[in-house]
Image (cartoon, grey):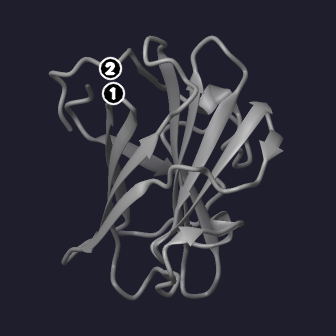
Amino acid sequence: MIQRPLSLLPHPASPLWPGVTLDAHVQRTGHGLRICYSLAAPPHLLQLPAPALPGFADQLWQHTCLEAFVAPADNPTYREFNFSPSGQYAEYHFRDERARVDASPSPSAPRLQWSSTNKGIELLAEVALSGIPHTQDLLVGLTTVLEDREGQLSHWALHHPKDRPDFHDRRGWTLRLPPHHPSHSC
């Protein structure tokens, strides 16, 4: 269990926006992960996608989108989850770095609860990790793409290992989660 908030940082090549902070908490559950994101930003700064029917949508990372990369610690396979403030999501399966298995919607959609605060937005995302044994350690990379009202993108993560944003680089997945234990809470 992670007690303290994890702070995501903008990539050094991204625009610097005063007053923007992004924190997260992660908890491993019996079936997957529970991720709590808290984004604070001046109300005039960010461009948020318009509400849409909840469901799978591709290329959400082209606009404001909260993300998570999840992999068994000892295996090159991984999953990418995208959560848009529009209410849409995506889940991609990879057999190796950037080698996507398919782009079809997952049979178990994530549970997303978006809320507005006086400082920004919050998201509680619960995702299933079917096919990943609950006895394995997980590597997790928390990432985000933010878009301002002029269309500039800023890339945020716990760690940026390259001189350009690359969320698929495992060296940026610095969070290691042990197997689930029922007594943990978010």
Which residue is nearer to you in this view: 141 or 152? 141
Which residue is nearer to you in this view: 132 or 48? 132
Circle 1 Cα neighbour tier, 10 Å, few/some/many (<14 / 14–19 / ≥20): some
Q: Is residue 73 left or right of residue 105?
A: left
- Give the residue displayed 52% in from the left and 82% down from the top: 49
Residue to which mark 2 is pinned: 180
- Give the residue displayed 64% in from the left and 76% down from the top: 152
Question: Residue 30: which numbered mark, if any?
Answer: 1
Secondary element type, mark 2: loop
Q: Which of the 4 image quadrants contains residue 103?
A: bottom right
Q: Give the amino acid at mark 1.
A: Gly
- Give the residue displayed 46% in from the left and 80% down from the top: 46
Q: Is residue 172 left or right of residue 117?
A: right
Secondary element type, mark 1: loop
Residue 47 vertical placement versus 155 (above, below): below
Res. 121 in view: no
Q: Give the amino acid at mark 2.
A: His
Picture coordinates of residue 141 (x, y %)? Answer: 53, 36
Work out how far the residue at label 1 is from the one at label 2, CA to CA, in angstroms: 6 Å
Locate the C terminus by quadrant: top left
Picture coordinates of residue 25 (x, y %)? Answer: 30, 41
**In contact (CB < 8 Å): disc 1 and disc 2:** yes
